[in-house]
Image (spheres, coloured by chain):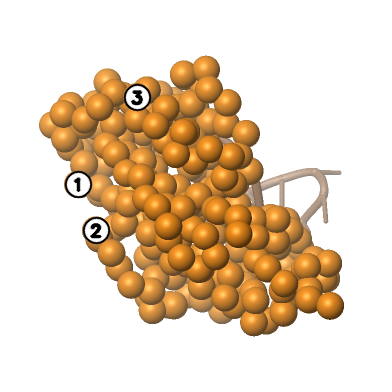
Chain colours: A orange, B brown
Amino acid sequence: MSVIAVIDFETTGISPDHGHRATEVAIVLVEGERVVDRFQSLMNAGVRIPAFITQLTGISNAMVAAAPAAGEVMRQASHFVGDAPLVAHNASFDRRFWVGELGRLGLPAPQPFACTMLLSRRLYPQAPNHKLGTLVDYHGLPRTGAAHRALADAEIAAALLVRMQEDLHQRYRLERVDHDVLMALQQCQRGNLAAALSRHVRA
DNA sequence: TGCCAGGCCCTCTTTAGGGCCTT
């Protein structure tokens, strides 16, 4: 059974192109409907954390100063993910930091990204909104830690992914819900889910 | 101190604009 890596970054801002850096990364490996492994670390990128980010995440300059260097952590994260495809909530954000931080080390970032926010918009258009915190309550998913910390958010995104896999399996009688199915669903037009998934339906 | 983005999606659209989502 294929493994999917669910990733979440905490950062100093929203744009690596403007010098913002990662402060924490967490990765949860999901196999089928089970979490089989976890990776989490603060990292020191040598930049100051704005006060409002500390207020949001609880991650302070002192915490990051005592953490391993960003390069060391990202090498470990890259090794941990390996060839597994990635999933994140609002993946365009985490993908930029994944590519940006690995790029600083001269490391490739070839993994395809699927996005639980885009998938949620497809699957649950009736949800109040598609923020991670809202979807936790909407689906009654367990909270495993403080929001806006990397591991807690990655665990929640992984639980959301499993819930989506279960719903896809039931709604569309899919043989298996792997990363290819998620990408097909993500890229299809709204209201056209069944057609997009037809080649994955059990005979 | 306050600001800095980008991809997706919807609609009073497509020769555009604005909301959502992430930190």
Upstream in sequence: badge 3 or badge 2: 3
User: On screen, A109 above or below A192?
Assistant: above
**Helix, strand, or loop for circle 1?**
loop
Q: Which residue is mark 1?
A: A58
Spatial CA span between label 1 and label 3? 22 Å
At horizontal 26% and vertical 41% (from top left) the residue drawn is A53
Q: Which residue is mark 3?
A: A72
**Helix, strand, or loop for circle 3?**
helix
Q: Which residue is mark 2?
A: A146
Upstream in sequence: badge 1 or badge 3: 1
Report whether A1 appears left or right of A155: right
Q: Is residue A157 visible?
A: no
**Helix, strand, or loop for circle 2?**
loop
Q: Are marks 3 and 2 in contact (CB under 8 Å)?
A: no
The single residue placed furthest to the front in the displayed view is A1
Could you confirm whether marks 3 and 2 are on the same chain? yes
Residue kind at label 1, given as amino acid type: Gly
Q: Nearer the viewer, mark 1 or mark 3?
A: 3
Question: Total label count?
Answer: 3
At horizontal 78% and vertical 76% (from top left) the residue drawn is A202
Residue kind at label 3, given as amino acid type: Glu
